Image (spheres, grey):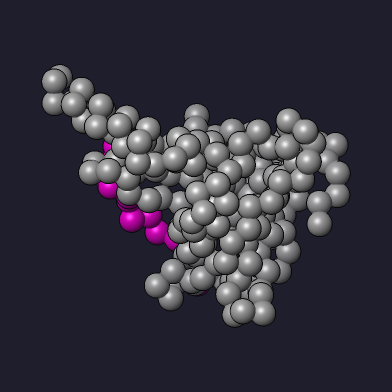
Amino acid sequence: MAKNLSALMMLAAVLTVEIPSFVLGQIVIPGDCPKYPTQPSFNPAQFITTRWYEISRYPSTFEDDTRCSLIDIRPSKQGALKMSFKGISNIDNAVTIAAGNAYFDYGELSKFLVQMPIVSWNATVDIRFWIIATDYTNYALAWSCDPLCTGYRREQLWLLGKQKTLSDTVMNTVTSRFFTNGPFKAGNLVPVVQKDCPSIV
């Protein structure tokens, strides 16, 4: 008991002192990052051609208090991909945009590494964005995991759709495969409101 309490106190200290609130908005889990398989024979050209709407996600500080959230991935002139997380603030109804450059992580096409500038820190944070599964026309499941202090990790998960909603058939298939009988926790997901959304460029 004392050893577990000590570990929790150490984690709290790290989260409070060493790591800003960006991490506090994500799921913190004991253990190292799992080596989940990603989409086999991933075709990036099919994935990045149009925007993806967020159906649900794990809590995220840089998307906190937003609705109508979506992700745009576009080629850029610099040779990297430009990945933009966009949404509407629930506080003042302003458009929110968090944008960074995305690269293929270690040359694996289904694994993106997004370099996200955090203005308030005057720094850039690397975010892994792995495509766990997609059928390119209906849904995609993207996952991120990074180690924190010894024995803990932070996780992020996005359930995405080509449209603002998923059909019952697709939703049931995804839920059964990746949540009910899979590694992810449906209880951690936060539904994203996609109704009465203004146009977001």
User: Given the current orientation, which residue lies at the most extreme left position?
Assistant: 2
Which corner quadrant holds the C terminus?
Answer: bottom right
Task: Determine the residue positioned at 52% across, 62% down.
Answer: 114
Can residue 29 be seen in this snapshot? no
Which image quadrant is residue 10 in? top left
Pick the front one: 59 or 8: 8
Pick the front one: 18 or 131: 18
Task: Determine the residue positioned at 75% across, 50% down.
Answer: 163
- Residues rendered magenta in the picture: 30-41
Task: Determine the residue positioned at 20% across, 22% down.
Answer: 5
- Residue 167 location in percent, x, y? 72, 43
Is 129 left or right of 161, judged from the image as shown? Answer: left
- Residue 19 location in percent, x, y? 39, 41
- Residue 74 location in percent, x, y? 68, 69
In the rendered image, residue 34 lying in the magenta stretch gets the answer yes
Pick the front one: 104 or 184: 104
